[in-house]
Image (cartoon, rainbow, N blue to C red):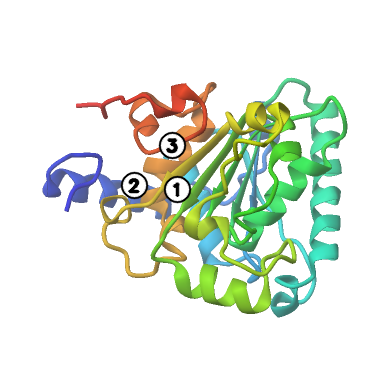
Amino acid sequence: MRCLDKPVPVAALLCFVVWFVAGCGLGSDFNTPDRLENGLVIILPGIEGKSGLNRDIRDGLAAAGIDQAIQIRSWGVIPLLKQMDFIGNRLAGAIIAQEIVAYQDKHPGRPVYVLGHSGGGGIAVFVAEGMPKGRQVDGLILLSASISSAHNLTKALKHCKNGIANFYNRNDAALLGVVTILFGNVCGTHGPAAGLIGFDKPGEKASDEKKLAYAKLYPVALTDDMTLGDSGAHVSTTRPDFVSIYVAPWVLSQQWPAMDWLATLTHGTAETNEQESQPPP
């Protein structure tokens, strides 16, 4: 088992340090005026709402040195019904988009990233779609997202400066395959989720507008090496060490794909996304 192509002892030590720092004394206030001056990262939880899972995401980001404000933003009302409330889910995305606009008006030029886990990944897409003309977020980061793999991302991508990074895991079939086929994704479509198999690529007959937009889509397929063999497929992307190593660089990088070595994990539609690059020594 390897992590970042380093031998097991080094990888284990690195992940322990991230876990230790995340849990010991980083401070509980991630929304201070100083942090807000540096930028904003909004974490959208799954249907469970605020929980240890999203706090783990926050701690992993902070442990990686992200100094922007980090807000955990709940959405929806009744946890078990949020998955099927596709009208309310789109409304929630539009409301959060307006909150981002208000932040941008007060803090012009500051970076804004929206990170969604599970159902929150679908809401993140709706947030981008809800941004008004001429406004963008810097990027969306989707972790095990419960939104249809066939969802048209053209509008969302137009409102993302850097694009959308979609982390998906083919071992997550129970929740993002069976459940989403039976009960639907947060967009209302029944079928496999983008968090399971990624988003559909534009076909040959797709418009030039769609093909151009999808050049900013960065699929990241999870491997056992990345998750350290974590058996909890749906929550493996929320672990603080995973977030620090694989997710935080997308917030820290001004241009995507994030860092050269991450480019090897993505298979976007643009030619630059398909070029090989090596991880750091």
Is residue 144 visible in the rendered image? The answer is: no
Upstream in sequence: badge 1 or badge 2: 2
Q: Nearer the viewer, residue 46 or 18?
A: 46
Q: Position of residue 253 (x, y in %)?
A: 50, 25
Distance between mark 3 and mark 1 Cα atoms: 25 Å
Q: Are marks 1 and 2 in contact (CB under 8 Å)?
A: yes
Which circle, 3 or 1, is nearer the viewer? 3
Q: Is tag 3's residue or tag 1's residue first in the polypeptide sequence?
A: 1
Q: What percent of the width, then of the height, locates residue 262?
A: 38, 33
Between discs 2 and 3, the one toward the N terminus: 2
Q: Amino acid at mark 2?
A: Val
Which residue is rendered at x = 50% and y = 29% of the image?
Answer: 252
- What residue sits right under mark 3 in the picture? 267
- What label does residue 18 carry, if any? 2
Closer to the camera, 30 or 197? 197
Residue 34 can be seen, yes or no = yes
**Observer-nearest of 32 and 63:** 63
- Quadrant where the C terminus is found in the figure: top left
Q: CA distance from mark 2 to mark 3?
A: 28 Å
